[in-house]
Image: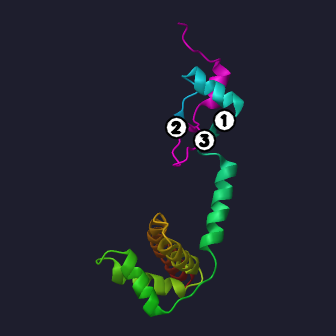
Amino acid sequence: MKKFRLPRKEKKSIRGKLLLYPADEKGNSLMAQPRRSQNDYDAWRQGILRDLFDSKRAKERSREMSEKLDPEMCIPEEQMREYVNDIFSEDLRSSAFSTFIRAKNSKTAIKAYYNFVNAYHIYKTGEDSYGNICCLALDSAEELLRKENFLRRNRK
């Protein structure tokens, strides 16, 4: 049996791409290696495979995510404490709550506050992966508040 070999230029054009077959009914995708397999190469030439890190698709997904997480939504502090208690472990609750209250009153970090509130609402509808986004919103709020304090100190 003859070994599958690609021309050098085609091999380079495929290099660095993480190609996947379309998802099945459960949402699982198989990884393809068109540099090594004739069947995968044929599927790539026919346009069946998709690149996991396609920049155009990534921009669309990012835009869709921002539309979900960026709408302005303010909630009372008591409700915010309930949200924080539900998402975070006991050792992080007080610091997370104070960080989000400071972010709510900040011009630069308020977006992280909105992201947390909207992600929590989506998380409560059953999308468990949005719980991670709630935690990322805390990290983002802390970083933005740190930058804001640094800029405020250096302006004086």
Question: Residue at point 62% right, 18% down?
Answer: 6
Viewer-proximal residue, 44 or 10? 44
- The Cα atoms of the two marked residues, 1 and 3, are separated by 7 Å
Q: Position of residue 124 (x, y in %)?
A: 48, 75
Image height check: is 25 above or below 134? above
Kindly check if marks 2 and 1 are in contact, taking CB atoms under 8 A apart as contact: no
Within the magenta stretch, is there residue 3? yes
Image coordinates of residue 74 in percent, x first then y, are 56, 87
The mark found on residue 48 in the picture is 1
Reply yes or no: does residue 60 show up in magenta: no
Task: Look at the numbered disc 2 and give the secondary structure of its residue.
Answer: loop
Tell me if residue 56 comes above or below residue 20 in the rendering.
below
Which residue is the site of mark 2?
Answer: 30
Secondary structure, mark 3, is loop
For marks 2 and 3, the one nearer the N-term is 3
Q: Is residue 96 visible?
A: no
- Residue 126 visible in the displayed image: yes
Q: Main secondary structure of the magenta part?
A: loop
- Residue type (three-letter) at the residue carrying disc 3: Pro
Q: Which residue is mark 3?
A: 22
Q: Amino acid at mark 2?
A: Leu
Magenta segment range?
Answer: 1-30
User: Nearer the N terminus, badge 2 or badge 1?
Assistant: 2
Q: Residue at 70% x, 30% y: name it.
A: 46
Q: Residue 137, percent across and down? A: 49, 72
Query: Element under label 1?
Result: loop
User: Are the residues tagged 1 and 3 within 8 Å (C-beta)?
Assistant: yes
